[in-house]
Image (cartoon, rainbow, N blue to C red):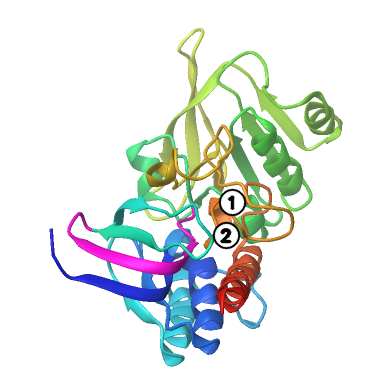
Amino acid sequence: MSNTIERIKCLIIGSGPAGYTAAIYAARADLNPVMYTGMQMGGQLTTTTEVDNYPGYPKGTDGTAMMEDFKNQAERFGTDVRFGMITSVDFSDKVGGIHKVTVDTSKVIEAETIIISTGATAKYLGLESEQRLIGGGVSACATCDGFFYKGQDVVVIGAGDTAAEEATYLANICSKVTILVRKDFMRASKAMQHRVEKTKNIEVIFNTELDEVLGDTVVEGVRVINNKNNEKQELKVTGVFIAIGHKPNTEIFKGVLDMDDVGYLITKGKSTKTNLPGVFAAGDVQDKEYRQAVTAAGTGCMAALDSERYLGALI
């Protein structure tokens, strides 16, 4: 481990809309932020081929290009963007205390404030065909990508509230939505199940799992299997929406920061403050309700402002 310890005012852990927006605001407030991007520079949005619902892009853009715009803007104001992983943390529980992190198991950094924007990772089934066609018809976000399937037939994989919400949202756009449920019942709340049942263009198929996504470069259909009798059938669809949940990227903060039973960081009231002074959380790492680029960016702004005010109160 290096003996050299770097001391900074504001450390941003993770990139994406939340991290880059926090960086823009923190840099403009002369906090001289340093960002460590994580292994997926730009976050989840870099897996989205088309972004049509972010303000300021009237003709749309793709996720990677948009995150490059965010990065360039953050760097324009002086953000030091670095590629690397925070592998361990040692956070102070005292107001004005110095927080320590280790980068890639070797470099130690001391920071007066920390903004966590490590995001969440969508859960997938792990099928080769599913992974190959992400961005070509396979998606984990109906709100993000549903528009592109207007008037078409799609399937939703899942049985909980997320799947029910995705399906009812898509039903307003698509001709038909088929929900594949691997058990003989849905886990969604009764209210969400009733909403599904009342939506005429939603069909629920129980005891059924996705066997393969069909198509070379874009989704042309799916092959499904009945897990009771092993019968297979093909459904002609153009979109496959995986709705089996998200996993917040908070492993290194367990036992250090307050989080819910799933792992989402808990922030206080309408702020981005965590349970430790000088540590803030923004974006999908603390938001399991909306999970949109624009809401993540909003909380990134909040986290930078919270950091600036925290440091100002120490003077």
Q: Which residue sits furthest right? A: 198
Please tell me in which quadrant of the rendered image residue 128 appears: top left
222 or 78: nearer the viewer: 78
Residue in the picture at 62% in, 81% down: 57
User: Which of the 4 quarters of the picture holds residue 181?
Assistant: top right
SS class of the residue under badge 2?
helix
Classed neighbour count for the residue bearing mark 1: other residues with Cα under 10 Å, few (<14), some (14–19), many (≥20)? many
The three-letter amino acid code for the residue at tag 1 is Gln
Which residue: 58% across, 77% down? 308
Residue 151 drawn at (x, y percent) = 71, 54
Q: Where residue 45 is drawn, which disc sits there? A: none
Q: Is residue 172 left or right of residue 106?
A: right
Which is nearer the eye, 150 or 234? 150
Residue where numbered disc 2 is placed: 283
The dominant secondary structure in magenta is strand
Residue 42 visible in the displayed image: no
Cα–Cα gap, marks 1 and 2: 6 Å
As for residue 74 lying within the magenta part, the answer is: no
- Residue 281 found in image quarter: bottom right
Q: How many labels does the image show?
A: 2
Q: In which quarter of the image is the C terminus?
A: bottom right
Do residues under tags 1 and 2 come within 8 Å of each other at their CB atoms?
yes
Residue 212: give x, y in percent of width and height: 41, 34
User: Which secondary structure, mark 1?
Assistant: loop
Tell me which segment is drawn in magenta. Answer: 104-119
Residue 229 visible in this rendered orientation of the protein: yes
Above or below, 174 against 40 in this view is above
Task: Decide if residue 112 is on the left or right side of residue 151.
Answer: left
**Residue kind at label 2, given as amino acid type:** Gly
**Residue tagged 1:** 286
Instruction: State the residue in front, 212 or 7.
Output: 7
* x and y, in percent, of residue 298 in the image: 65, 69
